[in-house]
Amino acid sequence: MSASAMVTVTYREAIRAAIREALVADERVFLMGEDVGAYGGCFGVSKGLLDEFGPERIRDAPLSESAFVGAGIGAAMGGMRPIVEVMTVNFCLLALDQIIDNAATITHMSGGQFAIPLVIRMTTGAGRQVAAQHSHSLEGWLAHIPGLKLLAPATLKDARGMLAPALADPNPVLIFEHGSLYNMEGELPADAGGCDIERAAIRRPGTHVTLVAYGGTLATALVAAEELAADGIEAEVLDLRVLRPLDDSAVIESVTRTHRAVIVDEGWRSGSLAAEVSARIMEQAFYELDAPVARVCSAEVPMPYPHHLEQAALPQAGTVVAEVRRMTGADG
Amino acid sequence: MTVAPRLDRDHGQHLLHQMLRVRRFEEKCVELYSAAKIRGFMHLYIGEEAVAVGIMEALEPKDAIVATYREHGHALVRGVSADAVMAEMYGKVEGCSRGRGGSMHLFDAATRFYGGNAIVGGGLPLAVGLALADKLQGRECVTACFFGDGAVAEGEFHESMNLAALWRLPVLFCCENNLYAMGTAIERYESETDLALKAASYEMPAWTVDGMDVMAVEGAARKAAAEVRGGMPCFLELRTYRFRAHSMYDPDLYRSKEEIERWKQHDPIAALTAQLQEAGLLSAGDIEELERSVAEEVEAAIAFAEAGTLEPVEDLERFVYWEPPLPTPAEEVAAGGDSTDESATA
């Protein structure tokens, strides 16, 4: 057997490799956004691509989120396959008209005449002490919108593999890269390629409780599961991966096995993705539950700057462990 | 250099015919709205017809159009059939957006008509992107982007003008300045009311045109389109006026009857009619014939819309995500489809 050689890469390099592969494979693909070219990407993702592909395909845009996101939509309708980079999810608020009123609606509003094969990548999440205008997790908000597809790569394999199928999709796909993951390092097969963008994935099997996580909270859930294992509680960790449309069956199957669920979500609790997942469990698996569904979310406060307050605002493994112990009766 | 349009009999009557098509179509829409056949928001273009008609003369089938929610005229003149537009107003499957869009969201892939955008300024970034796609794929196309004076106050206008000029994208920006952003007069919302001057600050050719004179609009559009095909975006401020209220809900209390009457003296249809008659290029019989053919077209469109079908409610959630078009019977035959399919073997 010829197992492919493994290479050590970071999350950042895995995304770069995916972008590079897309640019090589299809001349309709181009990357557009603020500082993607000469600067090499705000988070260094596109470093080196300008030299290799030139300014037509690695296109530095002015600080005009609405115009360049909208231009991505128009270019997609005109036959291109744009990858638009928005620095952070907070900045995408400046382009919400284009994302919601155009990207998400034109296919339907035109009676199905136009596909919007557009990918928008953006950084999300907190943990780097960049305060209340660069730290929020608004995935749940955008997951509210029919017409969009949302992906949250939490692993190297997904960072490497989600872009190709997203570009092949005839619908607008938003990819959320958690800022704390860019330096995550690990091994990937040298020939790693595309992956599915429909299903959630079990990252750790377990029998006593399901921890539902995505993006930045996957690591939190895995740490919590390790700690619980020491107590003899086997937590199953489910990575949602796809935030719209949600893979209900994976969640329900897991909860049907474990009979308990804790949702770990960096968004605020009110109106969150955690709320949505919780409601679906209640609707579809109410009689499987041995305890009410629990949520560990961010505190309902704009993200504060000081480290200790930021950490207090974010979902922590310790909180997840405490919730599980409480619901399994192992807390006392 | 482009040739200025010539006012010969055929061309003059063609322009008049196009303007009459829009005018009579919309006059009928008002009746149909009162009869509750058409619902929702409806914005009439009556008074502004010379703009769409003149601009479209400079466009070719390969060019793209992005329009606003006041776009019945643009769609009709571009070549979207009156049948398909009327059926859309009726919310029928036979409409140009399958009934899903209505008056404000007319779309037609066949004529590269990209809406029907009802967020003021929202169409400009799209037009920039369509032009970018054309440029990157080496197609010498123009994207004509229509928007009102109100859009000039939006950030998306400034962002899009900058981007188009910076990247030398083939966009023809057509600002239909009817002097009001809904009910607010331009001098009450713009610090600089010379919109061409404003546009010129983005380093693109920009000038003002009498939007009530279809020949002037056509001439300007031909000149601008030539610039755009040469690789430079252009901006036209088309000074025009809507004779009707902003929408069917608007009591029109913010402007005087005298002002409206004054502008009606510049009705583009009456003006061209007089011009052609003076030049001996239009007889009473010609007018009668034009009116007859337009009335026939509009009546046929109403009959088509009336006979149309409503989408089954089971299909409510279709087209939220793109679905490949179903093959036509002919395509199924060509693909060696299921021979038991009656439609394929018929």
Image (cartoon, coloured by chain):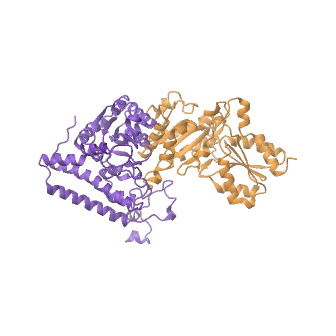
Chain colours: A orange, B purple
Q: Nearer the viewer, residue B130 or A188?
A: B130
Return the residue nearer the eye: A283 or B117: B117
Horizontally, is B173 left or right of A111 in the view?
left
Q: Nearer the viewer, residue A142 or A86?
A: A142
Q: Position of residue A175 (x, y in %)?
A: 57, 42
Horizontal and vertical percent position of residue B4? 20, 39
Q: Is residue B70 left or right of residue A308?
A: left
Which residue is most to the left?
A: B280
Q: Is residue A23 left or right of residue B84?
A: right
Q: x and y percent of residue A15 in the render?
A: 58, 38
Q: Quadrant of residue B161?
A: top left
Question: Toward which corner of the image does residue B344 lie, by quadrant?
Answer: bottom left
Viewer-closest of B65 and B90: B90
Can residue A190 be seen here? The reply is no
- Tell me how many marks there are: 0
Task: Give above or below for A45 relative to A172.
Answer: above
x and y, in percent, of residue A120 in the image: 53, 41
Q: Is residue A79 above or below residue B293?
A: above
Residue B85 visible in the snapshot: yes
Outermost residue to the right: A332
